Structure formats: C-alpha cells, structure tokens
Amino acid sequence: MHFRGLVFLLAFCSLTGCVIACSSQSSKSSRFPFTILDERPFHFGCTDRPSPLPPGTHSFVTFSPRAPYARTRLDTLNLPLNEVPALTIAAEPVQWIQIAAANQDHWTVQFCAEGEGNSIDEANGYLRRVSMQRTGSLLTLSNTDAHGLTGGHGNLLLTAPAGAPVTVHSDAALEVHDMAGPVRVSALGRATILNTTGRVDASAMDVDFAGSQGSVFLNASSEINFKITATNFHGTLSANAQREVRAYFPPGFQTPVEVLVNSPKDFVCHADFCSNIKKDRVNGLYRFTYGNAEGASDHIDMRSWDKQVVLDTIQ
C-alpha cells in the first residue's frame, strides 16, 4: 500500500510540475488530472487476505507490495441525529476517511479495522490494537505504528445527514461529498471536498475542492486545486497555499476573482476571461483582478506564498 501510494504521489507531482513548466509556453488548457475533482461513488470493502481459494484450487501465486496476511473486522454504528446533532472525528493515520451525505436522520458509521502481518497470528495481533471508540458526539480512531509492510490501520465510511455539521481532525487522507452543513477539516494528508453547499473550513497538506456555492476557506501547506462548476459562484471562496494554486472555471465565468502573488511571473492565466484582468500592486504584492471583487458579496480570492497561481477554463 505504501509503495502504491508513493508511485501515485510521484506520478501526480510529475504531472502537475509539467503543467506549471509548460504554462508560460502555451495558451492551451493545462493537463491537470481533473478526475481528482470529479465525484465518484465510494467503494468500501472489508475482507481478509488471502481470500479463501476458489473450489478446486489448491494454491496460487500473487505479487503484491503488501504483507501476505490481512485480517479484518467491521465495526458499525447508527447514531440518531437527535442524539448526535453534530459529529467530530479524531483519527490517527488510518488508511482513509470517506464522508458522503444522504437524506436521512441518522449517522451510519462503518469502520473496517485491518491488521497486516507475515503470519495470521501477527495480523490478528495488529488487528486487536485497531479500534473505534465513541464518546458522545466524538469518534476516536486508533491504529498501530507501521513496521514496514506490517501493522494495523482502519478505513472509515461515514454516511451523514446532509445538513448536519461534521468536523474531522486526521493524520490521514479524507474525502467529503455533497454535504450541506458545515464541514471543518484539519488533516496532515490530502483533503478532497466535492459538491458541498455550506461553510467549509479545510486545512491540509493538499486541498482539492469542487463546487458552485458556499463560504469556503481552503488552506494548504503544499497546494490547492479547485474547480468551479457553474458560471457564477454564490458565496465566497478563499484559497491560500504555500505552493501552487490551480483554479478551473467553466466558459463564461462571471464572479469576481482576485489573485495575490509575489511576482508577475507567478500569475499564469489561460482562462477565457484573461483579457479582462487588471494588474496593480498592493502591500508589495502583485494583484490581478477580474471584475470588482472589493465589496462584492460573491467573490473568489487566491494567494500563493511561494509558487504560482494558475487560472484555466475547462469545458
């Protein structure tokens, strides 16, 4: 699992680095992997490894950068909304956390605990040390320290009432879909938040966002990627990243935009409204504006502290 994550990270960084390198040479849309910003149904599995052999099979050979044995346990909770009006999750570095909104009056929690080892006994030993604990409106997820390919961890799938507030403090990557209530996220990994409509406060290493409305505040110690899914964004969006900010807009986008960068070369625009952007200086920074952002109730603000801000139009 760690190997596959490393391969993905290297491929992702290589691709996005190419986007920036080529942006000043071509007016074509940058080749960001937009699938990251597209919502797909969550898939949740909780199975032992190796699985039982098919009938008539006596043995098989597999090649995988994972421990040979995994043992799992599925823990579930159903929490009525009138008992738990808001939910907070505190997680050690579990594998991942996924949150999906639904039209329901309760929280449906599925936590797959998994222990991986070089033997069944070792896998079971790690499994026993992975847990989900509930204290009122707080869910605490714990795992074990990794020992190479062995150790214990968990995966959480939360189906939430769409309008209820949810807060996540996590060392893991997480993804949130379709919430209308407030979403607050603090993560050391990647936070992906798609098609929310309410308030979003997200702070993570990398942040991905897609939507068309809300009060959205994104902060990243590395990079931010976001896609606006309508020609007007209803509300405010603020994106502040230490490294790159990449923003993607539909054709004919109309909401005011303001960008702050350290140098003119740190602003790259391929959007169809580039010809209407104005440049000035404020507090020693270069400001690029589209429309009248000052005083507007609907507006988008971006700031990269060390790298570039890239604007593009996507079909």
Image (tube, rainbow, N blue to C red):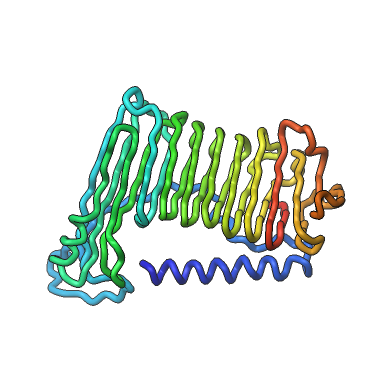
Between 213 and 300, the one lying in front of the other is 300
**Percent x, y of residue 177:** 48, 42
In the displayed orientation, state which residue is furthest to the top: 82
Tell me where residue 143 sits by quadrant: bottom left
Which quadrant would the N terminus be assigned to in this image? Answer: bottom left
Q: Is residue 206 visible?
A: yes
Whether 41 is drawn above or below 10: the answer is above
Whether 257 is drawn above or below 9: the answer is above
Query: Which residue is pictured at 20% across the width and 57% down the height?
Result: 127
Whether 26 is drawn above or below 86: the answer is below
**Percent x, y of residue 51:** 20, 63
Query: Which residue is pictured at 67% across the width and 51% down the height?
Result: 248
**Percent x, y of residue 206:** 54, 56
Query: Which residue is pictured at 71% across the width and 57% down the height?
Result: 309
In the displayed orientation, state which residue is furthest to the front: 283
Tell me where residue 31 sits by quadrant: bottom right
Query: Which residue is pictured at 28% across the width and 36% down the height?
Result: 135
Between 50 and 236, the one lying in front of the other is 236
Residue 248 vs residue 65: left or right?
Answer: right
Residue 247 vs residue 266: left or right?
Answer: left
Residue 215 vs residue 83: left or right?
Answer: right
Q: Is residue 315 visible?
A: no
**Percent x, y of residue 215:** 61, 35
